[in-house]
Structure formats: C-alpha cells, structure tokens
Amino acid sequence: MSAAEQGQSSDAGTGLRARLAEVRQRIDACALGAGRDPSEITLIAVSKTHSAEVVAAAAAVGVTDLGENRVQEAESKIVALAAAGGPHLRWHLIGHLQSNKARRAVRLFEVIHTVDSAALVGRLEKLCEEEERAELPVLVQLSLADEATKAGATESELPSIVEEIDGCKRVRLVGLMTLPPFFDEVERVRAFFRRLRELRDGLRARDAFRGRAGELSMGMSHDFELAVEEGATMVRVGTAIFGARGRTPA
Ligand SMILES: *Cc1c(COP(=O)(O)O)cnc(C)c1O
C-alpha cells in the first residue's frame, strides 16, 4: 500500500483489511491443500459485541456475510447499516433463538444456523407466512458432545427436525451447524467436524437438501483450518478478524 493510500484509510480500517485478508488466505491455502475449491467456502465475519461502525468498516473492506448471536443486538446494527446504504450484507443468526425473538429473526436474518427443535421449525414456518417471507434458509444446529450445557439438537432428534422441515413450504433446510466444546488441544475438535460431515452426507444421500450439496457451518478463529480440512463450507470467524471481544460474554 502506498503512503497516500495509507493516509486515506483509518488505522482501524487498515488493521481490519489486513486481518481479513490473512484469514481468507489461510482458508484458501487450507482448502487447496485439502483438494477443495476455496470458492465454495463462505467466510462469515462474526461481529457480535462490535459496533455498527466496525461493521461498516468491515463492509468497506469487502465483508459480505456477518454473524450475530443475539437478535436484539443485531437488530440495531442491521437497521443502521441498511439506513447507511452501501453494499447488500447477508446477516446470519448463529446464536440460540428463543421463540419470543423468532418473529424478529425472520424479519432480520438471511439465514438461521441455530434451528434445534421441530417446534421451532413449525413456529418459523408460521411466522414466514405471517411476515410474507417466501423462503427462509436454515441449518440445524447439532450438539455432538455429551454435554447437557451445549446448545443444539442431539443426533437422535435430527430425523424428526428434518422431517418437520420437509413438510414446510417456506423454511428450507440448507445444512448443518455445530459448535464443538473448547479443547486446549485443538486437534480434538476434528472428530466433531468429521461427524457433522457424515451426518450431512447421510442427509444428502436422502436428498434432504433438495438437489443441493448441503452446507457445513463449522470452525471459528482457533479451529477454522481444521474445519476447512473436514469440509466446512461456512466458517464463523470473529476474533481473528475483529480482535478480542474483551470481557463481554459470548
Ligand atoms: C462468537 C462465535 C463465533 C466466533 O468466535 P471467534 O472465536 O471469535 O472466532 C463463532 N460461532 C459462534 C456460534 C459464536 O457464538
């Protein structure tokens, strides 16, 4: 970058641009190393706890997909960014969805990654009708660890959730998502990513994605390379792009 260009961009924008480019480069290198096409991997920049101004700066350096885990927090940013004009942004809900927030989620988000029950599917379908939303792409979030605290449906609940979605006109299954437990030894998450891919492959064999391949939403700042090796098509990266979130709870 020339001195003149550097003078034009803010320090925050410059740092963001460099971190974004580095993450994208690592994804691409990893995909190529695994014999995959890098273009099939969507980078979702997780902007939770960061301001609308930070999101605008990210959009200005080429971010197109944003992840938020709380409907209320996301709403003010989505409204602010839409009001400011600029490029179209795709907002992904990646946090647990409470049924009392479902209507606003249907209005605000392009994709919901955290469908975890047949009851929620039914509610989303009804809300899509009421809100006149023709199509809502969703992923089923799976909890693959034996931890009662982890969000997501269990493997045994998956068939009934898929069946419920199959009966919907508006809610459409596009893939699976998981958030594995945190391990100091990052290699241990590989088994969870692999399992998610197997489940996706099983659903694909039954055409649960209606002719599409089926997305795998997996991988965060500390483990997205492993996720790409195991087939991720959507990686959700916050810290490595925006820096640490401080003490705000995830
Ligand atoms: C916060 C969050 C991320 C991003 O985490 P980083 O470690 O900051 O990359 C990804 N997925 C979900 C579900 C999250 O809540």
Image (cartoon, rainbow, N blue to C red):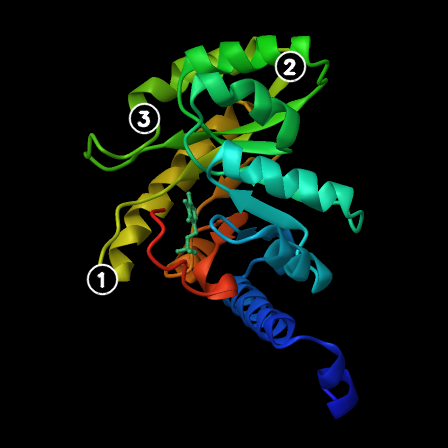
Figure quadrant of residue 210: top right
- Residue that extends furthest to the bottom in the rendered view of this protein: 3
Q: Are the two marked residues, 3 and 1, in contact with CB atoms closer than 8 angstroms? A: no
Residue hosting label 1: 185
Q: How far from the left and from the top, in percent, is residue 19? A: 55, 71
The crowding category of the residue bearing disc 3, from other C-alpha atoms within 10 Å (few below 14, some 14 to 19, many at least 20), is some
Q: What's the CA distance linking mark 2 and mark 3?
A: 26 Å
Counting residues from the start of the chain, the first of labels 2 and 1 encountered is 2
Label 2 or label 1, whichever lies nearer to me, is: 2
- Residue 155 is marked as 3
Q: Is residue 191 left or right of residue 245?
A: left
Q: Residue at x 48, y 38 (%)?
A: 94
Q: How far from the left and from the top, in percent, is residue 227? A: 42, 54
CB of mark 3 near ligand 1 (< 8 Å): no
Q: Is residue 26 left or right of residue 53?
A: left
248 to 128, vertically: above or below:
below
Q: Secondary structure at mark 2?
A: helix
Q: Residue at x 45, y 17 (%)?
A: 99
The residue under label 2 is which amino acid type?
Answer: Cys
